[in-house]
Image (spheres, rainbow, N blue to C red):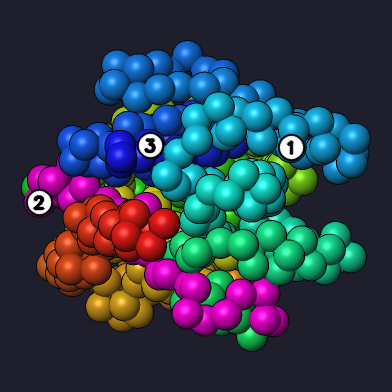
Amino acid sequence: MKINKKLCFIANSSWYIQNFRLNLCKYLKNNGYEIYIICPSSNFDFSIYGFRQITFDFNRNSVNPFLGFYDFLRLYYKISSINPLLVFPSTIKINFFSCLSCFLLGIRVIPNVSGLGYLFINESSLTRLVNIVYKFTFRYTSHVFFQNIDDIDFFTSRQIIPYHKAVLLPGSGLDTSYFKPSFFKRNRNYKFTFLFLGRFLFDKGLQEYINAAKIVIKLYPRTDFIMLGSHDESNPANYPCHLLKSQTSDKFFKVINHQHDVRPFIEGCDCFVLPSYREGLSRALLEASSMAKPVITSDVPGCRDVVVDGETGLLCEARNHASLADAMCKILAMDSDEIENFGKKGRRFVKKNFEEAKLFGIYANLISFNQKNK
């Protein structure tokens, strides 16, 4: 009997696969598996890596039940045509549709809760509905991936899933040989630079970053504040373009559009800042820490997991620009050796806990488990 070696990854954007699962897919293919990618159309061609790419354009933010059912049927038939050993979906709507499809098809599925997102940061009646749907669809999974222990506690305490199904991932894993520091000595006669890197969303703490900068600049005038990222107009928490432009008109601000390679910008900063309201596990914080930059971030799930407060960076209170400004001033008051020591400890922490080899091992073990228990 021929062994099924087909693995299917499903995401709501090709960008997600490129940035968070590409190296994993390469690893699995090198170990003899056939990789299928289902995602919306894009300019990126996964076939160059030997993967099978299937286009799935869907209504990402629509709450229309008829459009939702139509999207579900299309995804059902795409999964059915592949008939994989395992399906690995991510993001809320994709998780719902994939888990239900796999239940009906008798295919094993391991969804990834990569963060609780806008619906759970800003709880509403829709949040309660999502809890119910999660509980219904996740009962048919063999396991569920999470990226921080707080999200596991959230799901298990509400009996959405039993604890034995939860698997904690080291985020999306990180290639620390790619995100490596240069350890060159920065001349402190130059301006000190803070860097915010992420989508331009209120939930990322962008307003707090801007407000904190306006406090800090009065005390430390030789300071620059960079924001690198892009707007997400389909997200309810999108920070409008016109507002960003009006809020950052001062010369100490610099706004840079999304870049494919962020390493030069991380290398060029003195401290990385992400005052997010909640994350799955912040990839940007991992990248900055791996490049030996001290970080300032919120004391919330998915952010505090990446920082040892007072050793690799500083934690501040979420949604509080005064707390963030205070942390920035503490960093500015440090000498170069203290800052460099924060960065070196941060890199060691990431290498120990979030190296992508750990992610590969978890996936390999669960794939093997599901092959043996098919």
Element type where label 2 sits in the image: loop
Q: Amino acid at mark 3?
A: Lys
Membership of 182 in magenta stretch: yes
| Left or right of residue 316, residue 263 in this image | left
Please indicate, yes or no, whether residue 166 appears anywhere in the rendered image. Answer: yes
Q: Which mark is residue 6?
A: 3
Give the extent of the magenta segment.
158-183
How dense is the environment of label 1, judged by Cα within 10 Å: few (below 14), some, or many (20 and up)? many
| Quarter containing the N terminus | top left
Q: Considering only order in the chain, which callout, 2 or 1, is on the residue closer to the N terminus?
A: 1
* Residue 137 or residue 328, whichever sits in front: 137
Residue at image mark 2: 183
Q: Position of residue 149 (x, y in %)?
A: 47, 77
**Quarter occupied by the C terminus:** bottom left
- Could you tell me the amino acid type at mark 1? Phe
Counting residues from the start of the chain, the first of labels 3 and 2 encountered is: 3
Residue ID for mark 1: 72
Q: Is residue 168 magenta?
A: yes
Which sits in the foreground, 36 or 113?
36
Nearer the viewer's eye, disc 1 or disc 2? Answer: 1
Please identify the quarter of the rendering in which residue 30 is found.
Answer: top left
Q: Nearer the viewer, mark 3 or mark 1?
A: 3
